[in-house]
Image (spheres, rainbow, N blue to C red):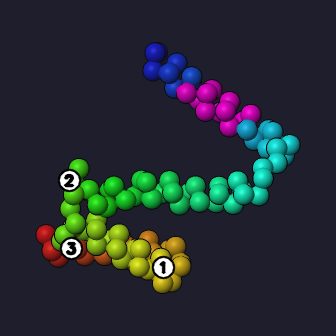
Amino acid sequence: MELVWVIVGMFIVTFGVRFVLYARAEKVFLPPWIEQALRFVPVSVLGAIVVPMVLMPNKEWDLSLTSPWLVGGIVAFALGLIRQQPLLTIIGGVVAFFLTKYLVA
């Protein structure tokens, strides 16, 4: 029962914070420079999640081209820069990852 109360408490806190922010969203105006800076938040967060996983898949540096994580990341990065199509970038990175994993291993 304690676990249920922990989950309910987490829900209340998470919902409460977001509800207050969204309820007041139309009444709050941010300066243009803050709005421009906030556009980089999703990319920064995604980079903070992905880069350690790609460069340190086993909690150790692995910068060899036999690392499927690194090869998939490089291919996805290159496709993203060249084509700028998210679905193609994801598919290319995943294909490169699995090809490296099963052909090089």
Identity of the residue drawn at 52% across and 18% down: 5
Any mark on residue 60, and which?
2
Identity of the residue drawn at 33% across and 55% down: 52
Tag 2 secondary structure = loop
The one nearer the camera, 103 or 85, is: 85
Q: Earlier in the sequence, mark 2 or mark 1?
A: 2
Which image quadrant for residue 71?
bottom left
Give the residues in magenta.
10-20
Disc 3 + disc 1, Cβ < 8 Å: no
Identity of the residue drawn at 22% across and 66% down: 63
Few, some or many residues within 10 Å of mark 3 (<14, 14–19, 20+): few
Distance from Cα at disc 3 to Cα at disc 2: 15 Å
Distance from Cα at disc 2 to Cα at disc 1: 27 Å
Q: Position of residue 94 (x, y in %)?
A: 36, 70
Q: Earlier in the sequence, mark 3 or mark 1?
A: 3
Q: Position of residue 80 (x, y in %)?
A: 47, 76
Identity of the residue drawn at 53% across and 60% down: 43
Disc 3 + disc 2, Cβ < 8 Å: no
Q: Residue beneath label 1, please?
A: 81
Count of labels in the image: 3
Q: Earlier in the sequence, mark 3 or mark 2?
A: 2
As drawn, 50 above or below 23: below
Residue sticking out furthest to the bottom: 82
